[in-house]
Amino acid sequence: MMIRLAMFLMASLLSSGTIAEQCRLNFVESDLIAAIGVKPKSVETIKDDGSVKKQYKFRNELSTDELFSDDAEEKYEPQFYLTISEPSCSKEVKIWFYKDNKNTASLTNEVLASRAFKYLTGVSESIFENKFNKFSSVNSFESFDDKTHSKFLQSGDIYSVDVLYNE
């Protein structure tokens, strides 16, 4: 009797679509943040068309007054973001950032990105650097590693790396 009940329940769940698909990105969010090596300055939860994203900002933002001050250039740090889609069962992590300036020279956004990429994909930071160097000849490309599929994009001074796990 119990076996029939269990089979009926399973069939009901399957037919109604309530059994969730397996999470493709299997990582611990706090370990990802720790792997970057810098504490985020802020975290924002974004709700967009029924989906939830968590966005981490790792650089100081200038206030409106600071943006229009004479020394804004001296204070400005190009932002580094990490956006996790559906944090409870993520399908994608977006690493995106602005080109470095002298204020980020001691710890560049490219280094922060390579640390996040290494944690998510398992490939070394030097491999990320080689991939990143492709931007000298192209604006976008895709990369397939053992466990991930990544999309690299450059638009002006903005760089984006979308990391998706292979199915």
Image (cartoon, helix red, strand yellow):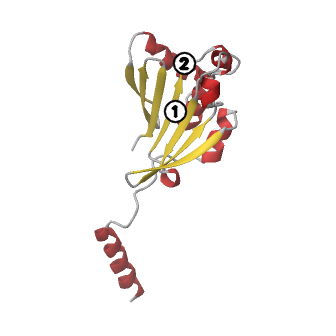
**Mark 1 surroundings within 10 Å by alpha-carbon count, few (fewer than 14), some (14 through 19), many (20 or more):** many
Q: Evaluate whether residue 83 shows in this view.
A: yes
The answer to which of 26 and 136 lies nearer the viewer is 136
Q: Is 155 on the left or on the right of 43, as rendered?
A: left
In front: mark 1 or mark 2? 2
Q: Is residue 74 left or right of residue 1?
A: right
Q: Nearer the viewer, residue 122 or 132?
A: 132
Task: Say which residue appears at 67% left-offset and 18% top-offset.
Answer: 103
Q: Residue 43 location, x and y as percent?
A: 60, 44
Q: Position of residue 88 (x, y in %)?
A: 52, 55
Q: Is residue 122 visible?
A: no
In the displayed structure, 152 sits above or below 105; it is below
Task: Read off the residue under disc 2.
Answer: 99
Residue 139 location, x and y as percent? 38, 17
Q: Secondary structure at mark 2?
A: loop
Q: Give the CA distance from mark 1 to mark 2.
A: 13 Å
Q: Say above or below: 84 vs 38.
A: below
**What residue lies at 44% left-to-right and 17% top-to-bottom?**
156
